[in-house]
Image (spheres, grey):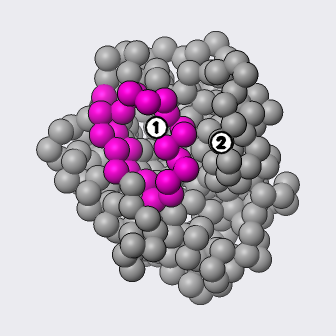
Amino acid sequence: MNKVILISIDGMRPDGLKQCKTPYLEELMNKSSYTFEGKTVFPSITLPCHLSMFHSVPPERHGTTSNTYVTPVRPVNGLFEQIKAADKTAAMYYGWEPLREIGRAGSLVAAEYINAYSYDHSDGVLTDRAIAYIKDKKPDFVFLYMVETDEKGGHDSGWMTETYLDYIKCAIGNAKRIIDEFSDEYTVIITADHGGHDRGHGTDMPEDMTIPQFYIGKLFKPGEELKNVSILDTSPTIADVMSISVPREWEGKSLVNNR
């Protein structure tokens, strides 16, 4: 089981996940090694957070501190580049167009972008298409990014509103479909990039900086609560699971066996 599916649910606060009334949360905790106290990077903004997630360095190192990409002075290979260098295949399904910047051109064998407002439930459509691709092609790594929690839930309606909580519930339902279909064959990881408050995010407030993470696979102990987890640990953990090399610049640690 050295293949991985990474699911990022944009703007998902841990307390929002706990309050969204998903019937799957207890089972998810029992299946996974997890945390409700993970830390993201500052500024807690979508593009900087995902660049840090995939490159295991903070924004002051990769250089992007807003949702406008900045070419780094000293580039660091990210997870997609390391996967390609190991002769493995990676695909990406995403609902926010600027995320194209998290991987260099040529590092993916497949990618599909759907605007969040193109469908009533664009996250569900992306999940459908990711599932179909995985069944057909069996890639080594798939990144599925859901944005409705952030765009339609947080920014449009407000963090912790009923609408926001409903979008989290839907996103977890989509994640459950992935887990049910592929967890015998893939390690499945669920994370958020940041939280939020009122109708925004980006500060160093705990509401913005605290994220949940779940790791489901044979290398992770079911029901174990992880400690001292950072978003910078995501790519080193995936690299460890996939047995691929880690650039010396990466600052995070592997969470395999919670070491």
Q: Position of residue 173 (x, y in %)?
A: 38, 69
Question: Callout 1: few (<14), some (14-19), or many (20+) C-alpha neighbours within 10 Å?
Answer: many
Which residue sits at x=73%, y=75%?
199
Q: In front here: 175 or 62? A: 62
In the picture of the structure, the residue carrying the numbered disc 2 is 69
Q: Are marks 1 and 2 in contact (CB under 8 Å)?
A: no
In the picture of the structure, the residue carrying the numbered disc 1 is 220
- Distance of mark 1 from mark 2, alpha carbons? 34 Å
- Secondary structure state at the residue bearing disc 1: loop
The range drawn in magenta is 89-112
Question: Callout 2: few (<14), some (14-19), or many (20+) C-alpha neighbours within 10 Å?
Answer: some
Residue farthest left in this picture: 136
Q: Is residue 144 magenta?
A: no
Which residue sits at x=51%, y=81%?
166
Q: Is residue 99 above or below residue 109?
A: below
Q: Position of residue 221 (x, y in %)?
A: 47, 40
Q: In front here: 47 or 153? A: 47
Residue 150's disc is none
Image quadrant in which you'd find residue 2: top left
Amino acid bearing label 2: Tyr
Q: Is residue 257 visible?
A: no
Q: Position of residue 105 (x, y in %)?
A: 44, 30
Q: Position of residue 152 (x, y in %)?
A: 55, 76
Residue farthest bottom in this picture: 162
Which residue sits at x=51%, y=63%?
147
**Image quadrant occupied by the C terminus:** top right
Q: In front here: 192 or 183? A: 192
Mark 1 and mark 2 lie on one chain; the one further toward the N terminus is 2
Q: Is residue 196 visible?
A: yes
- Secondary structure state at the residue bearing disc 2: loop
Amino acid bearing label 1: Phe
